Image (tube, rainbow, N blue to C red):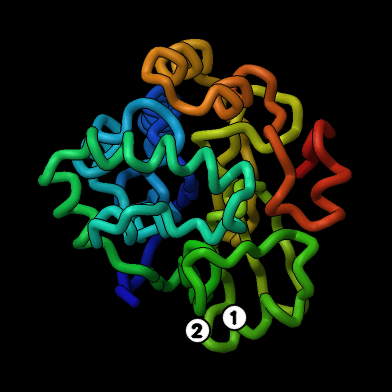
Amino acid sequence: MKSLGDIKGKILGFGGVYSNFQALESLKAYADGADIPPQNIFCTGDIAGYCAQPEECVQLAKSWGINCIAGNVELQLASGEDDCGCDFDEGSRCDVFSRQWYPYAQSKLSSDSIQWMKSLPEHLTFNYYGKTVVMVHGSYSGTSDFIFKSTPWREKLNHLKATGADIILAGHCGLPFKDEKDRFLWLNAGVIGMPANDGETAVWFMEMNEDQSVIHHQLKYDHITANRLMIKNKLPEAYAKTLVTGIWDNCEILPEIETVAQGRKIEL
């Protein structure tokens, strides 16, 4: 757990770049245009992943100087492991696809990028206008845990209490949401590397204001180029297709509530 002390002003949160350089460039352009400084920008991990430009994404995040935590992909790559650590069921479609994109990412990343990944903390905490914010990738106890909007509140509350957080900002599950009860808040900014299974090519990030109000935004980017680069580099065609359809190849990781919402517009 790395502490950043007090953070003032609007903050921007995002996750799951998944080697989608076109999306990361578009997000940086948005942040620059909105005058949000790097110290107020937070990434929940998994900068490398399914798409075609892992090295470019890591180097941009590094040079940008934003706050990042390690996702399961960073932890595995930094340790030289031979799988992504996504906790997919063995033999599932996601597991099979990871055997294509993970070795590709390994082969493209420089030693400088790997060293940067090794420097990332697993959790960050900071004070935000009287609230304690803790960043996790999956959950506090498990980097690869999938926490969704439909996940029982008692499970979220356990992590909030364990960290002493008023607000948890998490990633990993791929879907944006906000879940609030009593004085506690669980946020997922969504991911920018893949659509949110909602039938739209735009991806998701979030902003939080001084009064702790949260706004989720959709981000448009050059998804056609991202798609073509995946195909050119022989990465999973199903994931490349998702970039242009907005629909996931499968719902293996999703609970029933999120599964039946496939293809529906997300209202946040």
The residue furthest left is: 112
Residue at left 36%, top 68%? Answer: 122
Q: In this view, does 39 lie to the left or right of 27?
A: left
> In the picture, residue 103 is in which quadrant?
top left
Pointer 2 residue: 163
Q: How many marks?
A: 2
Residue 33 makes an appearance in the image: no
Q: In this view, does 244 lie to the left or right of 60?
A: right
Percent x, y for residue 80?
24, 57
Percent x, y for residue 11?
46, 51
Residue at left 60%, top 26%? Answer: 238
Q: How crowded is mark 1: few (under 14 residues within 10 Å), some or many (20 or more)?
A: many
Pointers 1 and 2 in contact (C-beta within 8 Å)? yes
Alpha carbon distance from label 1 to label 2? 5 Å
Residue at left 58%, top 44%? Answer: 94
Which type of secondary structure does the marked residue at label 2 adopt?
A: helix
Q: In this view, does 224 lie to the left or right of 91?
A: left
Q: Quadrant of the N terminus?
A: bottom left
Residue flagged by tag 2: what amino acid is it?
Answer: Thr
> In the picture, residue 87 is in which quadrant?
bottom right
Which type of secondary structure does the marked residue at label 1 adopt?
A: helix
> In the picture, residue 195 is in which quadrant?
top right
Pointer 1 residue: 160
Percent x, y for residue 45?
41, 53
Residue 52 makes an appearance in the image: yes
Residue flagged by tag 1: what amino acid is it?
Answer: Leu
The residue furthest front is: 91
